[in-house]
Amino acid sequence: MPFSPAALRFFRQLSSHNDKAWFEAHRDHYEQDVHYQSFVSGRSLTDALVTSSKLPSLLAREYEALLPLVRWLNGSLGLKPAEKR
């Protein structure tokens, strides 16, 4: 199951407001739209999709939608951003 439109909207907003105060002010959206869904998020792939030329762009979009949350969580845990190679 891909993320819902509400969860994707939350991730986009988070990428523009990557600070704890904003997150705390929007915690209810996180709880409702992201938190519980994130534990069951996944995608069933048909054989046609697995062999499709569209698969890389589909996975890239879904990965990019998760990055703001991962970066925020890493920062909250005191983890340094990865260095560019």
Image (cartoon, rainbow, N blue to C red):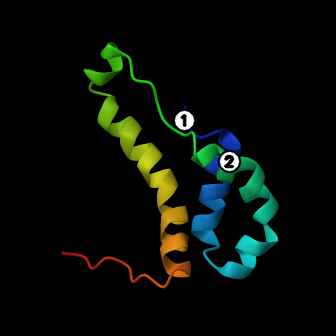
The residue drawn where x is 37% and y is 45% is 60
The residue drawn where x is 59% and y is 48% is 38
- Which numbered disc, 1 or 2, marks the residue that appears first in the sequence? 1
The residue drawn where x is 44% and y is 53% is 64
**Amino acid type of the residue tagged 2 in the rendering:** Tyr
The x, y position of residue 62, in whole percent, is 46, 44
**Amino acid type of the residue tagged 1 in the rendering:** Pro
Q: Residue 16 lies in what quarter of the image? A: bottom right
- Is 25 displayed left or right of 64 in the figure? right
**Label 1 vs label 2, nearer the camera:** 2
Residue lying at the far left in this picture: please name it.
Answer: 85
Kindly state the secondary structure of the residue where label 2 is placed: helix
Image vertical order of residue 23 relative to residue 76, above or below: above
How many callouts does the rendering have? 2
Viewer-nearest residue: 61 or 78: 78
Q: CA distance from mark 1 to mark 2?
A: 13 Å
Q: Which residue is mark 1?
A: 2
Quadrant of the rendering where the N terminus is positioned = top right
The residue drawn where x is 26% and y is 26% is 53
The x, y position of residue 79, in whole percent, is 43, 81
- Is 16 displayed left or right of 42 in the figure? right
Image vertical order of residue 61 relative to residue 42, above or below: below
Q: Residues within 10 Å of mark 1 (few under 14, many from 20)?
A: some
- Is 42 displayed left or right of 52 in the figure? right
Q: Which residue is mark 2?
A: 36
